[in-house]
Amino acid sequence: MSELFNIKNTFSEQYTLIIDSDIKAVNVHMISRSQLRWDFTVLQVGDDHVKVKIIVLDHILLEANNPLIKEVAALTNAFSRLYNELYLTVDKEGKVIEVSNMDVIRSKWQQTKAEMEKIAENNPEIKNAIVLNDNIFQDEKKLIEGIQNNEFFLMYFNKIYGRKIPGNFKENALNFFNSANVHWSFDLKNSSNPLLSSNEMIVELSGEPSILLNIGFYNRAYIQFSNQIDVSKLKTSLNEKGIYRTEKSTGRIIEASITREEIADPENLYAKLKYTFYSDEILKYKMSDEYNTANS
């Protein structure tokens, strides 16, 4: 019997996310590992919405093989503090409906903008970033889209909340190079584990294109590489897999992992992303002597 998976009760939890990224774009190969930490509190659960507070605790680039990654990370961190304290209303699927502290976020942008303008005179990249973000902060819809696309929402509210489990659904979303739209098909199922308590459930997610990728997709997705490789000879493998350990009584995620892969050419053109997500109770256990002894 299928039932909707929802946040059912208030709770507070701290989470750590590790992102392992391996992207090859013909002549550019970027490998990185990042760590993010949040304090997440569900303040109120309504019939059709949830009020939440999200505080960013940490955002660190742990490893990088390319100086470009470090430059992008530094610029990203400069802007991330604008969103380091969010009071939001989201629907049952985790889509942002309202930002309660919009005034605070906009005032932070004015401060950041003033600081960046002082150093932007001889740096066109910073000038462009100021213009881009100024447009975003003047448009509430764009600002909400920016919040929706941050790593917490891409991980935590990733296609399981507000869905029937077991069940399946289709949606249009970008490929992992963020260059072309894809018609996706997703399956959700629950599975039991004798090692877990009766209040816990495993949710498994798997997704792949629902129709064959046609020449239109290849031209849109990889046009920027068409001078370097023969796009017509590519045969892309595209999939997303996730597994979530959850608490039934609250709808809280205890730990999770997601892999996203887009392999157009195994040697020259691919994106491999792995997200590993721990609540503090799991993180502390994995750092404990008991865990290290069991896995030594």
Image (tube, grey):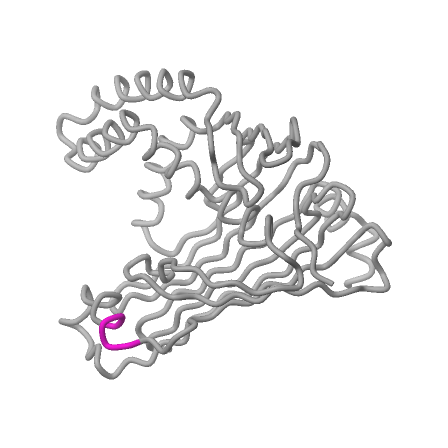
295 up-or-down from 108: above or below: below
Picture residue at 29% right of the left edge, 62% below the top: 180
Picture residue at 86% right of the left edge, 54% below the top: 198
Left of 211 or right of it: where is 97? right
Q: Quadrant of residue 122?
A: top left
Towards the viewer: 189 or 247? 189
Residue at the far bottom: name it: 233
Work out which quarter of the rendered image holds the C terminus and state it.
bottom right
Residue 98 at what x, y percent from top left?
A: 46, 28
Left of 182 or right of it: where is 92? right
206 up-or-down from 211: above or below: above
Q: Quadrant of residue 178?
A: bottom left
Picture residue at 38% right of the left edge, 73% below the top: 263
Residue 216 lies in the magenta-colored region: yes
Residue stretch rendered in magenta on the structure: 214-218
Picture residue at 55% right of the left edge, 45% below the top: 93
Towards the viewer: 179 or 8? 8
Left of 99 or right of it: where is 241? right
Residue 62 at what x, y percent from top left?
A: 49, 47
Work out which quarter of the rendered image holds the N terminus and state it.
bottom right
Magenta span main SS: helix
Residue 237 lies in the magenta-colored region: no
246 up-or-down from 98: above or below: below
Residue 9 at what x, y percent from top left?
A: 73, 35
Residue 248 at what x, y percent from top left?
A: 76, 48
